[in-house]
Image (tube, coloured by chain):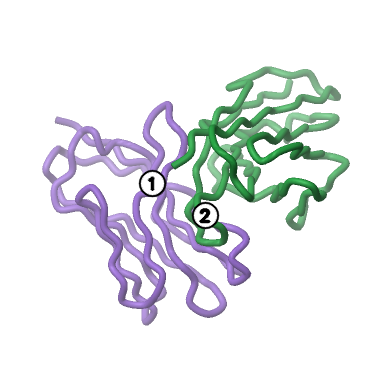
Chain colours: A green, B purple
Amino acid sequence: SAVISQKPSRDICQRGTSLTIQCQVDSQVTMMFWYRQQPGQSLTLIATANQGSEATYESGFVIDKFPISRPNLTFSTLTVSNMSPEDSSIYLCSADGVTNTGELFFGEGSRLTVL
Amino acid sequence: GDSVTQMEGPVTLSEEAFLTINCTYTATGYPSLFWYVQYPGEGLQLLLKATKADDKGSNKGFEATYRKETTSFHLEKGSVQVSDSAVYFCALLNQAGTALIFGKGTTLSVSS
């Protein structure tokens, strides 16, 4: 198993600013994922982050808005850029236990409120 | 595209009641299916899974059977406890095996 720590756990941000969320895993993992959970909605995959390559973004998400770093096998960051109230959401970091099996470990999430 | 639909919540039950949370899916082929659970203040964690038709996943007294005829993966437990209060998410693995697609989640509240 893997333990995933995210920070900040929550934040209140001003419109137009950017915020970086950090995700630390206590063991080396191949794939890391960033999800968004908007109020009353399901979890939506933003992107997959692999070490040594650019993140792979899902339809509707772009690198300019959600730049992602993956400098090593235990760490990743997601930046939410030029925020608007529509970006208010919970952002979840996850990592695979065994590659391509769907068995993921999740952090507790970062709850962002944009005013 | 692939999608998961699960019953709206919240579901409120008394301790020892029988639980069913319905989940149906739309997908190409026969994807692996999952139930994840999020207890208060914690991250999502895998509860159970099934990888092919007629498989039954089980864990902590919960069960779900992969029914390809009805494209369903309903979660059941015979006798719920207060400690089962949580949000339950049904999910499928896309055909490429690269992404989990989640339902909206169902909140379960169990009272003593």
Q: Secondary structure at mark 1?
A: strand
Q: Amino acid at mark 2?
A: Phe
The label shown at residue A56 is none
Q: Splitting the image into 4 quarters, where does residue A32 fall?
A: top right
A90 or A94: which is nearer to us? A94
Rendered view: B63 above or below B9: below
Q: Secondary structure at mark 2?
A: strand
Chain of the residue under the numbered disc 1 shown in the image: B
Q: Splitting the image into 4 quarters, where does residue A100 fall?
A: bottom right
Percent position of residue B71, x then y: 41, 74
A69 or A41: which is nearer to us? A69
**Residue B31 as seen in the image, left or right of residue A79:** left
How many numbered tags mark residues here? Answer: 2
Neighbour tally class for label 2: few under 14, some 14-19, many 20 plus, Cα within 10 Å: many
Percent position of residue B42, x then y: 43, 30
**What is the quadrant of the C terminus of chain A in the image?**
top right
Q: Which residue is mark 2?
A: B102
- Give the residue displayed 65% in from the left and 43% down from the top: A34
Q: Amino acid at mark 1?
A: Tyr
- Give the residue displayed 54% in from the left and 32% down from the top: A26
Chain of the residue under the numbered disc 2 shown in the image: B
Pick out the residue farthest to the left.
B16
Q: Which residue is mark 1?
A: B88
**Residue A108 as seen in the image, left or right of residue B59:** right
A35 or A24: which is nearer to us? A24
